[in-house]
Structure formats: C-alpha cells, structure tokens
C-alpha cells in the first residue's frame, strides 16, 4: 500500500526533502502541525518568513525558496497520504524512507504527526460537494436611516451562485459592512496563499 508516487509528485520534491531534513525536530514538528492545521481549515498557511527566522536562530541557513519548498512538500505528503485509508504510522514512515530519502529522524516527526492527526484530515477521496459558478459583488451606500447617525454608510452586496452535485444552481445573496468585507477579503487572500503552496 503506497500513498506516494513519483509520477504524481511535484517537481523538486527530492530537493525539498533535503531541505526538510535540515530542520531541527522541534521546529519540524511545529511546521508539520501548522500544515495539518491549514489542511483542516483550523489555521492559516505557515509563513515562510517566520520559519526562516526560526532556522536562523538555530544557525541553519535555508533560503526563502527552500523553506517554501519544505512547506509545499509537507502539504503534498499529508494530502497524498489522506487518500489512503488505514495507513498507520509505521507504514507512513516506511514509505517515506523508501521513496523520498527522508532521514529517520525527520520521518519519525512526520509519522508521529500523521498518527495523531490522520483521522482529522479531510479525505481527498470525498465526493464533490458543489461548485462555485459565479461570484459577484457591488458597493452600495445608505443615504438615510432613522437609526444611523452616519448618513452615508457604504455596504457590500455579494451574490454567489453554486451548483450542487445534481447540477442544480442556487444563488445566495448577502450584505456585509466594509469591515466584514475586509475580513472576508483577508480570508480569500489566505486561501490564495494556500493554493500557491499546493
């Protein structure tokens, strides 16, 4: 039973594994947990600059691209492993060591996080839950209100059209204040950052 396939693996995976092997165990465990949290939608994408500065504190010189590659390879490995049901810690470690060149020390860190979090990772073999068809937004302004002291209050109206698995399209509309929309936009930026590393 194998979750890792060289045919499906991203370009530069072995170089990324070499960078991963240089991480101190404790820092690697934190990075693995951050990646797993991002895959579970519990946290944001790990920041390259944070991990680069932590490595510098440990006298390890890895460039921005090497740290980014390490983050990318962790996303790939945990996502790929989530496709396989009943993959235990020992199997996970054996596959990593045989097929990627990961050190025993680093492999054990990844396998420990895998064993602890595998049940919480979203299965990538789950059925499709729908598809975004259209996303529109517009800015509106309230000119008068009996309860508002501010006569010119901007708001954002959002229309989202979604197709479910039966291809039935539904449109949902909602309004947000400017601060709410800014938070929404910040979340979309985090999604974009995540997609860049996947």
Image: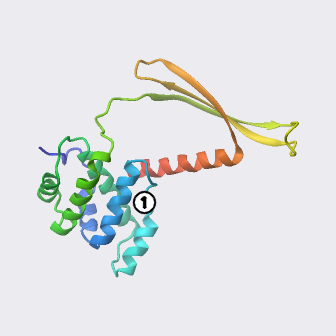
Colouring chosen for the image of the structure: rainbow
Indicate the position of residue 49 as horizontal and vertical percent values. 46, 68
Query: Residue, x 28% and y 67% (percent of image)?
Result: 19
Residue at horizontal 47 percent and vertical 17 percent from the top: 168
Element assignment for label 1: loop
Q: Is residue 23 visible?
A: no
Q: Quadrant of residue 173?
A: top right
Q: Residue 193, percent across and down? A: 47, 52
**Left or right: 142 in relation to 76:** right
Q: Nearer the viewer, residue 48 or 90?
A: 90
What's the residue at 33%, 78% (across, down)? 60
- In depth, the one of 191 and 146 nearer the eye is 146
Q: Badge 1 is on which residue?
A: 46
Up the image or down, 47 lies above or below 119; here it is below
- Residue at image coords 27%, 57%: 12
| Left or right: residue 101 compared with residue 34 | left
Q: Quadrant of residue 82?
A: top left
Q: Position of residue 79 (x, y in %)?
A: 29, 47
Horizontal relation, residue 15 to residue 168: left or right: left
């Amino acid at each position: 039973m194998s979750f890792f396939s060289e045919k499906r693996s991203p370009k530069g995976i072995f170089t990324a594994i070499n960078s991963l092997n240089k991480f101190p165990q404790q820092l690697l465990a934190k990075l693995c947990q951050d990646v797993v949290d991002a895959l579970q939608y519990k946290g944001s994408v790990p920041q390259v600059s944070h991990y680069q500065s932590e490595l510098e504190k440990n006298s390890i010189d890895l460039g921005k691209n090497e740290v980014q590659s390490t983050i990318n390879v962790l996303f790939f490995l945990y996502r790929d492993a989530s496709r396989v049901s009943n993959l235990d810690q020992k199997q996970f470690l054996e596959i990593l060591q045989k097929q990627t060149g990961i050190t025993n020390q680093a492999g054990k860190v990844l396998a420990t996080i895998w064993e602890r979090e595998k049940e919480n990772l979203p299965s990538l073999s789950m059925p499709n839950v729908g598809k975004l068809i259209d996303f529109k937004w517009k800015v509106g302004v309230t000119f008068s209100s009996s309860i508002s002291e501010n006569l010119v209050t901007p708001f954002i109206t959002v229309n989202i059209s979604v197709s479910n698995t039966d291809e039935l399209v539904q449109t949902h509309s909602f309004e947000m204040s400017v601060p709410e929309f800014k938070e929404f936009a910040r979340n979309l930026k985090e999604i974009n950052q995540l997609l860049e590393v996947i």
